[in-house]
Amino acid sequence: MMRREFQMIVLVLLCMLCVNIATAQDVRQKPVVKKQPAPATTTKQTATGTKQKQVNTHKWEDKGCYYEGLAWVRDTNWKYGFIDKTGKVVIPCQWNEAFPFHKGRAEVKYTNGNWVKIDKTGKVVR
């Protein structure tokens, strides 16, 4: 009799544990925070007057990691291009999809669905 009661208690505890695991929230999940776009210029008041500094006006929706000195970026029109490590646009955003550079080449997708390889100047290569 004692063994049967012990088995029932273990079974109930296991069920409770399973329910807790199934309903637990992932504490690693971070809340989504929308980034505010950077202003086109910043103004600084000084003793001699007002100074303005030009700020990068590109608003990237997404950006990849740098490979071979270039990273793919996606603009607000969902077109892909490439920038260098200083943030300068090297290849304008004109592709529907893009993969990072590897051995001096990157695969990009035209609007008609064809994939081609380009070099670091944006020219199509074979």
Image (cartoon, rainbow, N blue to C red):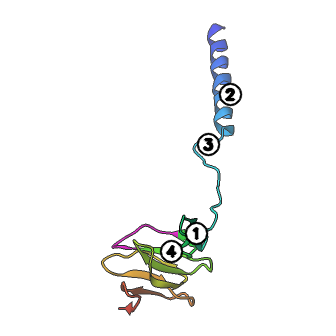
Picture layout, residue 126 above or below residue 25: below
Question: What label sits on residue 16 in the rendered view?
Answer: 2
Which residue lies at the image location 32% right of the left edge and 80% below the top edge?
Answer: 104
Q: Which residue is mark 1?
A: 42
Closest to the camera, between mark 4 and mark 2, is 4
Residue lying at the far left of the rendered structure: 103
Alpha carbons under labels 4 and 2: distance apart: 48 Å
Q: Amino acid at mark 1?
A: Thr
Residue 119 relative to residue 2: left or right: left
Magenta-tinted stretch: 63-70
Which residue lies at the image location 30% right of the left edge and 77% below the top edge?
Answer: 103
Closest to the camera, between mark 4 and mark 1, is 1
Residue 22 relative to residue 97: left or right: right
Mark 3 and mark 4 in contact? Answer it, CB < 8 Å: no
Label 4 sits on a secondary structure element that is strand
Q: Earlier in the sequence, mark 1 or mark 3?
A: 3
Q: Which residue is mark 4?
A: 73
Instruction: Name the image quarter holding the N terminus.
Output: top right
Residue lying at the far front of the rendered structure: 48
Alpha carbons under labels 4 and 1: distance apart: 24 Å
Q: Earlier in the sequence, mark 3 or mark 4?
A: 3
